[in-house]
Image (cartoon, rainbow, N blue to C red):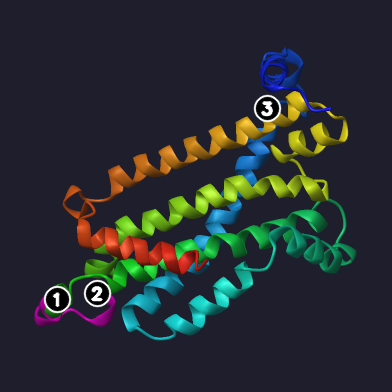
C-alpha cells in the first residue's frame, strides 16, 4: 500500500539524505550527468534540424503548412510506444548500449524539433516587413537580410522554442531508463520495481528541479545574447503564442 503524505515526505527525505545514494556508479550525481548528456545531445541535434528549417520557412514563406503538419504528425505518436518500436527495429542491428541509446535519442529529437522549428519560423515571420524593405533598400542580399536582420530580431522566439524543447526533453528523457539506459529515470523504474517510494519520489523531484535549473540557464543565456531592445512586446507575445500553438496543436 502506498504511503500517506507524511510518510511519503519522510521516505523522500530519508532517501535524499542517505549518503549511499550520492556515491558510486548509480549515485545521484552520475544519474544527473547521464540525464544531462542525453538531453544535451538531443537538443543539439534537434536545433541543427529545427532552426535552419524554421529560418528557411520563415524567410521564404514556403512549405510551412506541409513541414509543420508533418513534424507535428510524427510527434503525435505516443513517445513510449515509438521508443519501443525503434528499439525493436534498431536493436537487432547493433550491439551494446548503442542499440538502446540511438533509438532513445532519435525519439527525443522528434519530440524536441516542433517547438524549436515553430519558434524559429514564427520569429522570422513576425518581423516588421518595413525592416526587410529597409534592408533591401540598403542593397543587402537575401542571405544578408536573413542573418543580419531577421535572425537577430527573431532571437527571442528562437530562445523561447529552445527553452520549451529543453523542458520537454529533460522531462521525457526519463523514458530512456525503460530501455535499460541510465539517467534520472532509473530511480523511477527501479523504485517502482522494488516498491521503494522514497526513491521514486526522489527521482521525480530531481527531474523537476533539473528542468527548472535548465530553464533558468537558458533564460540567463538569452539575457546575455538577446539585445535589450528586442525584449518581447505585446505583438511579439502574440507571435510567441502562435508559435506555441503550432508546436502543441492540441
Q: Check if residue 143 falls in the magenta segment.
A: yes
Pick the front one: 55 or 13:
13
Q: Check if residue 199 falls in the magenta segment.
A: no
Please tell me whether mark 1 or mark 2 is closer to you in this view.
1
Pick the front one: 70 or 44:
70
The Cα–Cα distance between marks 3 and 1, rounded to whole angstroms, is: 54 Å
Characterize the magenta stretch by its predominant secondary structure.
helix
Helix, strand or loop at label 2? It is helix
Pick the front one: 225 or 191:
191
Are the residues tagged 1 and 2 within 8 Å (C-beta)? yes
Are the residues tagged 2 and 3 within 8 Å (C-beta)? no
Label number found at residue 99: none
Helix, strand or loop at label 3? It is helix
**Range of the magenta residues?**
134-144
Q: Can residue 154 be spotted in the picture?
A: yes
Residue 111: x, y in percent? 59, 61
Disc with the residue nearer the chain's start (2 vs 3): 2
Pointer 3 residue:
202
Residue beneath the point at 30% across and 70% down: 124
Disc with the residue nearer the chain's start (1 vs 2): 1
Pointer 1 residue:
135
The quarter of the picture where the N terminus appears is top right
Task: Please determine whether, in this image, residue 228 is positioned above or below residue 186.
Answer: below
Residue beneath the point at 83% across and 46% down: 180
* Quadrant position of residue 33: top right
Helix, strand or loop at label 1? It is helix
Label number found at residue 144: 2
Task: Please determine whether, in this image, residue 127 is positioned above or below residue 43.
Answer: below
* Quadrant position of residue 177: top right
Crowding at dot 2, Cα within 10 Å, few <14 / some 14-19 / many 20+, comes out as some
Amino acid at each position: 500500500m502506498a504511503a500517506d503524505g507524511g510518510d511519503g515526505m519522510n521516505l523522500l527525505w530519508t532517501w535524499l539524505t542517505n549518503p549511499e545514494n550520492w556515491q558510486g556508479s548509480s549515485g545521484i550525481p552520475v544519474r544527473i550527468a547521464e540525464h544531462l548528456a542525453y538531453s544535451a545531445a538531443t537538443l543539439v541535434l534537434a536545433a541543427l534540424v529545427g532552426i535552419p528549417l524554421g529560418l528557411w520557412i520563415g524567410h521564404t514563406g514556403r512549405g510551412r503548412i506541409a513541414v509543420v503538419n508533418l513534424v507535428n504528425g510524427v510527434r503525435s505518436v505516443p513517445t513510449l510506444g515509438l521508443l519501443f518500436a525503434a528499439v525493436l527495429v534498431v536493436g537487432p542491428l547493433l550491439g551494446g548500449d548503442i542499440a538502446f541509446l540511438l533509438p532513445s535519442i532519435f525519439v527525443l529529437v522528434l519530440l524536441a524539433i516542433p517547438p524549436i522549428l515553430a519558434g524559429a519560423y514564427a520569429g522570422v515571420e513576425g518581423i516588421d516587413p518595413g525592416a526587410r524593405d529597409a534592408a533591401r533598400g540598403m542593397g543587402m542580399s537575401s542571405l544578408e537580410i536573413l542573418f543580419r536582420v531577421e535572425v537577430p530580431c527573431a532571437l527571442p522566439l528562437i530562445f523561447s522554442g529552445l527553452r520549451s524543447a529543453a523542458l520537454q526533453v529533460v522531462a521525457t528523457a526519463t523514458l530512456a531508463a525503460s530501455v535499460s539506459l541510465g539517467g534520472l529515470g532509473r530511480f523511477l523504474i527501479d523504485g517502482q520495481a522494488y516498491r521503494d517510494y522514497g526513491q521514486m519520489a526522489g527521482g521525480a523531484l530531481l527531474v523537476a528541479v533539473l528542468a527548472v535549473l535548465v530553464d533558468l540557464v537558458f533564460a540567463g543565456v538569452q539575457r546575455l545574447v538577446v539585445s535589450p531592445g528586442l525584449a518581447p512586446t505585446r505583438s511579439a507575445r502574440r507571435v510567441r503564442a502562435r508559435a506555441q500553438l503550432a508546436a502543441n496543436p492540441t
